[in-house]
Image (cartoon, helix red, strand yellow):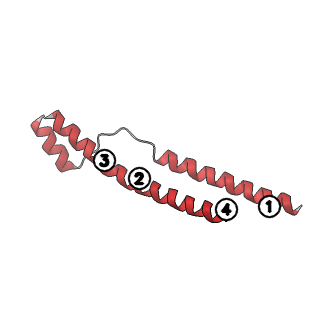
Amino acid sequence: MLINSKAKIQNSKVNGFWKVLFFIAYCLLPIASQAQCAMCRASLESEGNTAKAEAVNDGIVYLMVIPYILVGVVAIVVYRMYSKKKAE
């Protein structure tokens, strides 16, 4: 009976982990948008230079991705530390 309850607790932890993982993945899905600050939009629309507008949009995406990469690296390091400690 004790083993069965431990298995249920472990199974619920695994299910919870997957739910959290899928929620995070859902939140991180890219959303196609052309969002810009008002100043950037005004300066880019007035000139009519599409190459400059695309460069600004690429810069915004670049700045947005960096924090997610950093969080991912930290998560991988923590996971490796946890699995290494568990193996010992």
Q: Amino acid at mark 1?
A: Lys
Instruction: Give the mark nearer the N terminus: 1 vs 3.
Output: 1
Which residue of the protein is positioned furthest toward the front in this rendering? 88
Q: Secondary structure at mark 2?
A: helix
Where residue 49 appears, x then y in whole percent? 13, 35
- Please tell me the numbered disc located at residue 87: 4
- Residue designated by label 1: 6
Query: Are the two marked residues, 4 and 1, in contact with CB atoms closer than 8 angstroms?
Result: no
Q: Amino acid at mark 4?
A: Ala
Mark 1 vs mark 3, CA separation in Å: 45 Å
Q: Secondary structure at mark 1?
A: helix
Q: Secondary structure at mark 4?
A: helix
Position of residue 36 in the picture relative to residue 8 (left or right): left
Callout in the foreground (4, 3): 4
- Residue designated by label 3: 62
Query: Are the two marked residues, 4 and 3, in contact with CB atoms closer than 8 angstroms?
Result: no
- Residue designated by label 2: 69
Count of numbered badges drawn on the protein: 4
Which residue of the protein is positioned furthest toward the left in this rendering? 47
Callout in the foreground (4, 2): 4
Q: Quadrant of residue 35?
A: top left
Q: Secondary structure at mark 3?
A: helix
Q: Quadrant of residue 71?
A: bottom left
Q: Quadrant of the N terminus?
A: bottom right
